[in-house]
Image: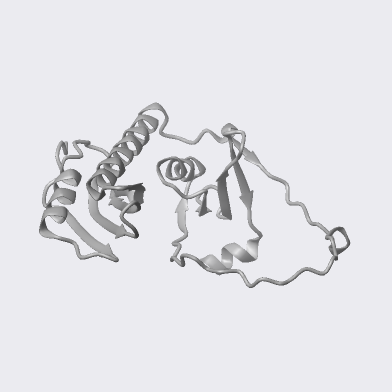
Amino acid sequence: MQTVNVDLNITVTGRHMEVTDAIREYAVKKIESLRLDYPRIIEVKVILDVQTHQRQIAEIVLFCANHITIEASSTSEVLYAAIDETISKIARRMRKHQTRLLKNNRPRYGSIRHMDESVYHSEVIDNHETEEVEPLIIHKENYRIRPLYPDEAITELEIGERPFIVFLNQKTHQLNIVFRRKDGDYGMMELPDNAASAAA
């Protein structure tokens, strides 16, 4: 049983700043202090970003066994405090994941609400002339679609910060999206067959 994380592959990088040995050692020791036996951590990426004196960000991404990814970020006036808060978030999500695993190893399909697709015709849309503004891509990232059961997708949603999970449903072999609803429940949408074929 893993009680302390040692010899981890930890990468610490900085944006708008140079990462000092002191801050690097602090981040590494905090990560190694995560005394949890599950999920087992394989690799860690730490991104430190000093935008202003009042806005310093610490983002940590854990790549764990069983294809589990846990990520969190915090903002503070002090970078050390941002690291501490992010580590606390990571630890809470790891405990939440472990508790959920102990309670139920198989899906609770009744907790997922299937949403019917609605198609709106162009006549419904207001045709007033408006100034067209080209959308701005603030952050572009790669997204890997993985085969999961619905309960595994919900678990990833709970421990991560993404508002949705796109996955290949292992039960139906269809491309699905699980997302958080405003009422606290989860919704699931099934994409057309040709979308699943394109993803494969």
Residue depicted at 18% across the width and 44% down the height: 30
Q: Position of residue 69 (x, y in %)?
A: 35, 50
**Which residue of the protein is positioned furthest toward the front in this rendering?**
53
Residue depicted at 53% across the width and 66% down the height: 199
Of the 4 image quadrants, the one containing the N terminus is top left
Lateral position of residue 54 relative to residue 126, left or right:
left
Q: Position of residue 132 (x, y in %)?
A: 71, 72
**Of residues 73 and 95, which is closer to you in this image?**
73
Q: Where is residue 15 in the image (x, y as percent from the top left)?
A: 29, 65
Q: In this view, does 28 lie above or below 3?
A: below
Lateral position of residue 38 relative to residue 125, left or right:
left
**Which residue of the protein is positioned furthest toward the right in this rendering?**
123
Lateral position of residue 156 relative to residue 110, left or right:
left
The answer to which quarter of the image holds residue 152 is top left
Residue depicted at 84% across the width and 61% down the height: 126
**Of residues 187 and 125, which is closer to you in this image?**
125
Residue depicted at 22% across the width and 36% down the height: 36
The answer to which quarter of the image holds residue 90 is top left
| Count of number-bearing discs | 0
Lateral position of residue 200 relative to residue 190, left or right:
left
Q: Position of residue 51 (x, y in %)?
A: 34, 60
**Which residue of the protein is positioned furthest toward the top in this rendering?**
103
